[in-house]
Amino acid sequence: MSAKKQSLNIAMIGHGFIARAHSNAFLQVSHFFDSPYQLIPRVICGRDRTKTEAMAARWGWCEAASDWRSVVDRPDIQVVDIATPNALHAPIALAAAAAGKIVCCEKPLALSFAQADTMASAVKNLPNLVWFNYRRAPAVALAKVMLDEGRLGRIYHYRALYLNQSGNDPTKTSGWRYQRAQAGSGALGDLLSHSIDLAQHLNGPIAEFCAMSHTFAPGRDVDDAVAVLARFANQSVGTFEATRYGVGCRNRNAFEVNGARGMLAFNLERMNRLEFLDATEPAEVQGMRDIMVTGPNHPYWENFWKPGHEIGYEHTFIATLGDFLQALDRGEPFHPNFEDARKVQKVLEAIIGSASSASWVKV
Amino acid sequence: MSAKKQSLNIAMIGHGFIARAHSNAFLQVSHFFDSPYQLIPRVICGRDRTKTEAMAARWGWCEAASDWRSVVDRPDIQVVDIATPNALHAPIALAAAAAGKIVCCEKPLALSFAQADTMASAVKNLPNLVWFNYRRAPAVALAKVMLDEGRLGRIYHYRALYLNQSGNDPTKTSGWRYQRAQAGSGALGDLLSHSIDLAQHLNGPIAEFCAMSHTFAPGRDVDDAVAVLARFANQSVGTFEATRYGVGCRNRNAFEVNGARGMLAFNLERMNRLEFLDATEPAEVQGMRDIMVTGPNHPYWENFWKPGHEIGYEHTFIATLGDFLQALDRGEPFHPNFEDARKVQKVLEAIIGSASSASWVKV
Amino acid sequence: MSAKKQSLNIAMIGHGFIARAHSNAFLQVSHFFDSPYQLIPRVICGRDRTKTEAMAARWGWCEAASDWRSVVDRPDIQVVDIATPNALHAPIALAAAAAGKIVCCEKPLALSFAQADTMASAVKNLPNLVWFNYRRAPAVALAKVMLDEGRLGRIYHYRALYLNQSGNDPTKTSGWRYQRAQAGSGALGDLLSHSIDLAQHLNGPIAEFCAMSHTFAPGRDVDDAVAVLARFANQSVGTFEATRYGVGCRNRNAFEVNGARGMLAFNLERMNRLEFLDATEPAEVQGMRDIMVTGPNHPYWENFWKPGHEIGYEHTFIATLGDFLQALDRGEPFHPNFEDARKVQKVLEAIIGSASSASWVKV
Amino acid sequence: MSAKKQSLNIAMIGHGFIARAHSNAFLQVSHFFDSPYQLIPRVICGRDRTKTEAMAARWGWCEAASDWRSVVDRPDIQVVDIATPNALHAPIALAAAAAGKIVCCEKPLALSFAQADTMASAVKNLPNLVWFNYRRAPAVALAKVMLDEGRLGRIYHYRALYLNQSGNDPTKTSGWRYQRAQAGSGALGDLLSHSIDLAQHLNGPIAEFCAMSHTFAPGRDVDDAVAVLARFANQSVGTFEATRYGVGCRNRNAFEVNGARGMLAFNLERMNRLEFLDATEPAEVQGMRDIMVTGPNHPYWENFWKPGHEIGYEHTFIATLGDFLQALDRGEPFHPNFEDARKVQKVLEAIIGSASSASWVKV
């Protein structure tokens, strides 16, 4: 059966933590999804040869390479997956686009809105994907279904946090994530970009906002924390906060929605759960219910294990890729793509502007 | 208005912790319930004169006394409330009954079933009450309503725990609670009696069971822990456990019920909450809901504060007394009374027998 | 013993929900605290005679009155307690101050900063109290102790929410709480005032902020929701949000603090709990711990019941009053007083300014 | 690098849900562990040819076969993995042992203790493994470390539940899991076997117990629910309950331990968490802490993702296999093996005896 499938040769650029999550997705997608393609992990490319070769050996990449420009131009490659520090996203994506490849890129898409805009234009006629993977945590996907069904009625409040403690050692200034030239921003692009993407995915466009940012660590030129007041186009009130100084929080990518008919809450630290209160029920039985989103009848429940059996972080990448391959096969649009990420980047850049000018900004 | 109310002169025997909770109930009931009577805290009686006088001064008892026999016989007293160590429950209750008083008694009712049986017979034509106060935690009362409505369908499982760490210092052997002659039993009468009363209140009679008990502390002649397997008359399966060595648990008086149509869970450590899962809902929105049982439409919600405002431990006594006074006024039966407590005592005594004979027992 | 105590005759103005909570505190304080005074509930005063008389009868006020001016001037009254709608706070407080009374006032103190300023000046030589009762929830008091001990180290983030659904019926415009002339503001004064008081109590003064407010209900002239970005004087970053459209939340008065050495979290919906993460522990045993703040060794644990036995909403008022009477007896300052409330009012008024001018404001 | 590794050809018998989890482990182990071997998924064998071929295609098994006897005897096979209904475990394991293979077997090991005893003897000189996978949930492994370190001191109580609702449709009698000839028992072998294995792993041998079992569904000849009172060899008191009628519970494989120095709690429905209370801390900061067991310094944290990133169900199999391969390479014993499973089976069989004789049994 698999012999008949079209194969796609993948080139992945990057060899860090996120490249590991991508590698896993490329290898695992066909086990959990009816993949229309046979994915071939053809070449992994990274600056550190030893690490790149170790990754290749461990994850089954056929080849290890070190020059991304030559890899991107190889005619046997159909898919270029970008898993590098942020500063390399644009040059690699533009080269891959120029070479007519399918382009997948880690978030945040770019260092600036100008970059993101150019990149989105470059790939607009090519299949493309940005790894805003949390849209496809089953609990988030369930929230999306419920919101689209109107289960919450008119939305009053959208509240998002992304708190971790990754940067709370103020003496730590090395690492590309703490340098503006490499990362573009700090907690903003690293963490809040996820929150913004989810917010616009779930609650529609943000219309205007006012932001503040703060750097706790002396010597860093990126933000350690950012907070935002917002109004959405649907007239709901939004608040956002992201920080790398959220001591006590490991990975609290959380949102809450209050609507006329109920409430939803999600927290990535318990990613298999969605909390829901149905305000249309009799008052005496209303309460936040803790839904274990592992089926039956939940997004992706037939793909993964069975009801009551949790999935982990990596499955959000597998589900993203599974849906992307289906859309590719059917010639349908896929989201989140570069265009979606461009919209996120527009907000991120405007947040920087709002924070530095201490004023409200319309998107 | 209050001038027209019949007054009831109260005599309370005891001056310890539980006497404080009773005193509070006598003073507070008319603030939260439309009390048909004016309760007069006439006399508090205790063995330690200093403590008794201090309690009288603090809680507004008109008099302090030390000889319960003369107090019980006073013609100006209508209500005798027993808040003493267990060993005194029977003599005081029997004397109060002989004097024709309304009798209220702390749990467990007696040291033995024989005592309880005699006591229940003695008061059967007098208004009487046993302070199994947790029946009237609003969350427990809501569970009762839901079970009676059939919201859970046929019951499969009833599971109860009462875990605290009150006795986990094995060198502690003083105190009446650790002496069989004073207390009758240990965790059994102190803790499991509540669980048994709630179980029979919520899920009907226990038909048969098998028990074990254990004493961790050298030199104690009462049980520190007890565990029970049970079958209820309604064919559901029961398990019970109580311990004073539940290190980490402060007051975990908890039960869970699984039925064909859903699940309920309660834990006294979060006494304003009832958890409920409605298994008749679509699978994708099923989840344990955490109901804050402070109204609207919850038991006692109009008596106490307002929705979202928690009540505390003492309100279970106030609600018990409020309902008792209403029943008294209407000439209606009140529960839990001595007869209910007699049934609990029957189970407690049979548990001792089962544990010592290591065999199943029918109730 | 009580015969020797000085008595204080109380006049309470107001007969609504909060007057009930105050009445309870006046009656109960001597049961849980060693009160240096004998409090006499001398007179309750309200506009609705029937309701006032009913309150008097139920809660044991000696007299019912309807003209607050004459009550405030009565020479037999030592304490004037203000439990009216907000608009009456200032005239009553000023009259009471002019009459030299001890003055207790419900929050928010005033309709405007100008009012609050005048009021604070008027009482500055008189014992006075403002019912920011949540400072004395034992869990909040424990947080204060831990912060003062430096258990959290340098503070990075302070995050506060006060969400309820009290106003989420947009057709509801009656009631003094929804009219600016009566209430001064909406969610701001009703809810956020508590959050601001707690924030400044726990984390010190707010230095600057930027706010937004929103009214969902057509026809209301008060805010339904308010959100704030802030910087504290201690360089920490703050966020605040309060709403009456928080569907799904009954009384979520919550805060979180992230510091260099750990994290704290509180939520009034589980008021007997404080969550704490100690970041100085070995990483492998770090986790948010759920502390049941009922003793041993917790604030007020010897006043109320015993470890593992929850207290309710009303105990925050009792503890406030208990501490106030101790301070009065010793001639020591008490907090929160009119001066503290004046500082809260200053922030509230500046929030209105910031929201309407869409700009940052320094306090 | 991988070229130098010894390869192991795997034959897996079975094509159901659990075979999927095993397949995943064989493919994934080398990505997360430094595998000393190259595992080759040589052949999958199942009775239903269509399903077997589909599994082979999806999971990359080189061949699909239908006659397990011939597969087990193939000289090119080094490892036989048994993922069949319980009744086939013994014949396949005995044949694999006779052929000198490494043998891996799904739990419960056998239909009876006699079978298990024979099987354990047969493999005693061969590397072998039984898939009691939950020992290696990182949170369970952390509990084991903490108990072995004496962090809980003397153990007083061990309390285990395994509740799901898999069998709560009483009309459902088909399926091998509901037939004694195929499954040996019901909830007992399916669910309680995990609890017994974990209990003996964490708390040492069970010395004696008394059990009850119950079948709710008419026509089933296996138990739907089982409950057990136990005494461990270390003098602690145990309780166990397993049911397929636990409506509201999806996969609640939970245990709690109370010891002199603290408490631990685990629940598979939140498998990335371990709850811990340290009773040696000052009382005022004691509380159950919710440890997210994803590192740093947790079992397997360097194998999987990074702190704050959850893992799922399948990683318990991967970790089991990873440790097994390491032990195999080093010639060290591995646990849980057939001998461990034999001890579990001994308890399971004695539970059946205790339940049918309604009496206490010594192990």
Image: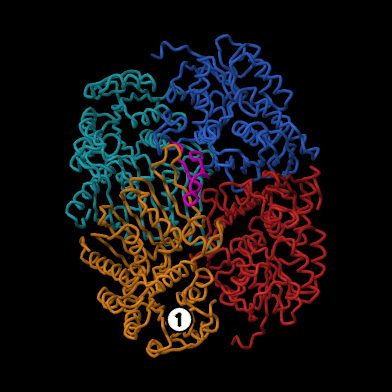
Chain colours: A orange, B blue, C cyan, D red
Q: Can you say which quadrant of the picture contains the C terminus of chain B?
A: top right
Q: Nearer the viewer, residue B181 or A200?
A: A200
Quarter of the rendering containing residue B122: top right
Q: Can you say which quadrant of the picture contains the N terminus of chain B?
A: top left
| Picture coordinates of residue A286, whole percent (x, y) | 43, 41
Q: Element type at marker 1?
A: strand
Residue furthest to the top: B75
Would you name the residue on which mark 1 appears?
Answer: A8
Residue D363 seen in this snapshot: yes
| Picture coordinates of residue C189, whole percent (x, y) | 27, 42
Give the magenta-colored segment's residue range: B271-294
Against C54, residue D247 (above or below) is below
Q: Which residue corresponds to the image point at 72% horizontal and 72% vertical from the top-left?
A: D67
Tell me if D217 is positioned left or right of A56 in this view: right
Q: Amino acid at mark 1?
A: Leu
Against C237, residue A109 (above or below) is below
Q: Dot 1: few (<14), some (14–19), or many (≥20) neighbours within 10 Å?
A: some
Tell me if C312 is positioned left or right of D288 in this view: left
| Picture coordinates of residue C95, whole percent (x, y) | 21, 29
| Picture coordinates of residue B264, whole percent (x, y) | 55, 41
Against D333, residue C210 (above or below) is above
